[in-house]
Amino acid sequence: MTPGRPVPPPLAKPLPDLSADAADTEGATGTADVTGTPGPRLAAAYGATASDSGLVPLTVARRSPKEDDVEIAIEFCGLCHSDVHATRGEWGSQNYPLVPGHEIVGRVSRVGSAVDDFTLGELVGVGCLVDSCRECDSCLDGLEQYCENGMTGTYGAKDRRNGDAITQGGYATSVVVDRRYVLHVPESLDPAAAAPLLCAGVTTYSPLRHFDVEEGDVVGVVGLGGLGHMAVKLAKAMGAEVKVFTTSESKFAAARELGADEVILSRDEAAMDAANRSIDVIIDTVAAPHDLNPYFRTLRVDGALFQLGLPSEKMPPVNPGALIRRRIAYAGSLIGGIAETQQMLDFCAEHGVTSDVEVVRADQLNDAYDRMVAGDVKYRFVLDTSTLGTPSERADA
Ligand SMILES: [Zn+2]
Ligand SMILES: [Zn+2]
């Protein structure tokens, strides 16, 4: 253990019997390995042991790659607001210990015998889901995020194909994921700045693509955080004109730096009036309750507003008249499917789009969470997993 790091909590589980697992034919047969060692491995990680524990060093047991599995040596993992809500138990009860993180970028370290689409050492990514039923209409349509039987989240979810183990996320030195849910990350992308594309990037890319945004369209972006700054960059890369709505004049310069053509102070009624009927589609990234009706008035006929943030309290009511009079669609959207996430990564490589990031060490994670809640980050924190240390001899999770 590195001096100065917080003391880990009592160990919850014994070390998996590596020799027994290594002899398990399903686990070990045909696994290609850079080190030649089959079997499960322990990963150093940071996670929560209770809703009020903060993030502390933990050790996670990762399964031995099965025939379709890819083992990834994680290099970077983005910090998403969902991670804060989940580890603090703000979205309902959780299974602790819980290692968050679903913006994972790393390199392939082992593959199962049936994996022929990933090579050792390749740069890869994992986003918000690591499995789904693969049989329902949504899955068959490449919309695994809307799986009718429930997608398996990258952390805190029951892993149905792996004995209902609770999935543990990317604030860790490694992870094992079925190849169907692993993305190819183009080498031209900076790995740290590419990590947030796996959640913040695809969450904004998907509704922009669903609306078929192209050159000549006008895109509005509400909120300029992790999601909002990606929406600006992606919409610009698609050739759109971009208008950013913000509640704070202090964000005007930052919005223009990101490429916004116009910045509108949302509490300035004259500026909102001037934007009347000027926008085709609005990407609303604000997770706090807010009145949408002033934004509907900025949309053209057949415009749409996609709400991406999920407020924990009730929103002010939507005025149906505002929708009816211009045939406006009020929609939601959740991340993206696997094929679309790959398409997004390739698009970002082609257009040189990545996230603006501040890389943090493991011992800065708790501060980073407080700063995220305070909105004090431009625009995404990313954990450098080389600072996680080494796993202890027994697994906590
Ligand atoms: Zn996320
Ligand atoms: Zn499904």
Image (cartoon, rainbow, N blue to C red):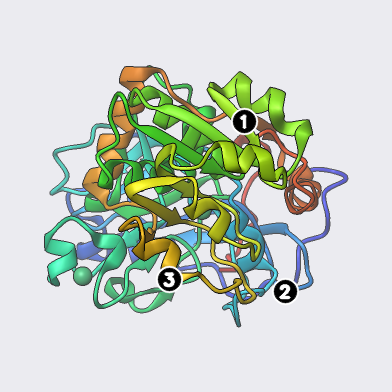
Q: Residues within 10 Å of mark 2 (few under 14, many from 20)?
A: some
Q: Is residue 65 left or right of residue 194?
A: left
Q: How crowded is the residue under tag 1: few (<14 C-alpha within 10 Å), some, or many (20+)?
A: many
Q: Please name which of the two marks, 2 or 3, marks the residue nearer to the observer.
A: 3
Query: Could you tell me residue 38's position as x and y percent?
Result: 32, 50
Which mark, residue 51? 2
Q: Write down the residue under mark 1.
A: 263
CB-based contact (under 8 Å), mark 1 and mark 2 = no
Ligand 2 positioned in quadrant: bottom left
Q: Position of residue 375 (x, y in %)?
A: 75, 46
**Marked residue nearer the N-terminal end (1 or 3):** 1
Res 19 seen here: no
Helix, strand or loop at mark 2: loop
Q: Is residue 1 left or right of residue 111?
A: right
Q: Which mark is residue 320?
A: 3
Question: Image quadrant of residue 142?
Answer: bottom left
Q: Nearer the viewer, mark 1 or mark 2?
A: 1
